[in-house]
Amino acid sequence: MAIVAACLSVPGTAQITNPGDNPSLNQFFDGANQCLSDFDTKAKAKKLSVDSYKAAIDGACVDKIKTLRALYMLSMERNPNQDYHIERFDANVKDAKAKMVSDYAMR
């Protein structure tokens, strides 16, 4: 079973990547990434301080990301490396949000 790290593209923001090999979840990754992109656009429009942005990003798109994680876990149910993939998923979400904070601070 090949591991595919598919980056789902939303221009201008960091991405949550698919650390598994289930392309049927791409629409859910796209939805979560679009939600983060929309958050970023709104934060820029409101001219949030970096500290406010950093505090707000933790709560951004929580429902979409929780749904995505649950679906991802189900898709990995029979995979002997399920724990690894879930850890990678969680790390990808954390990394994407950290990159968004960094990018916001650099603007």
Image (cartoon, rainbow, N blue to C red):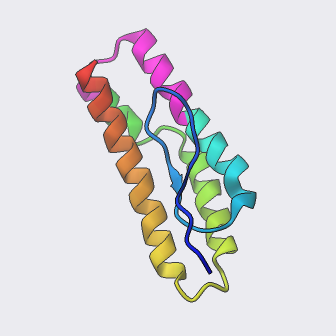
Where on the picture, by quarter, is residue 79?
bottom right
Residue at the image position 31 percent from the left and 25 percent from the top: 104
Does 74 sit above or below residue 56? below
Query: Principal SS element in the magenta part?
Result: helix
Find out whether residue 42 is within the magenta segment: yes
Does 99 sit above or below residue 94? above
In this view of the protein, which residue sits in the foreground, 96 or 60?
A: 96
Q: Quadrant of the N terminus?
A: bottom right
Q: Position of residue 17 (x, y in %)?
A: 51, 53
Q: Is residue 39 left or right of residue 29?
A: left
Q: Position of residue 33 (x, y in %)?
A: 56, 40
Q: What is the span of residues highlighted in magenta in the rendered image?
A: 36-52
Does 45 sit above or below residue 5? above
Q: Position of residue 20 (x, y in %)?
A: 58, 68
Residue at the image position 53 percent from the left and 46 percent from the top: 62
- Of all residues, the one furthest to the front in this rendering is 2
Residue at the image position 52 percent from the left and 64 percent from the top: 19
In this view of the protein, which residue sits in the foreground, 33 or 50?
A: 33
Q: Quadrant of the C terminus?
A: top left
Where on the picture, by quarter, is residue 99?
top left
- Of all residues, the one furthest to the bottom in this rendering is 80
Find out whether residue 72 is within the magenta segment: no
Q: Position of residue 92 (x, y in %)?
A: 43, 55
Residue at the image position 42 percent from the left and 19 percent from the top: 43
How many numbered marks, from 0 up? 0
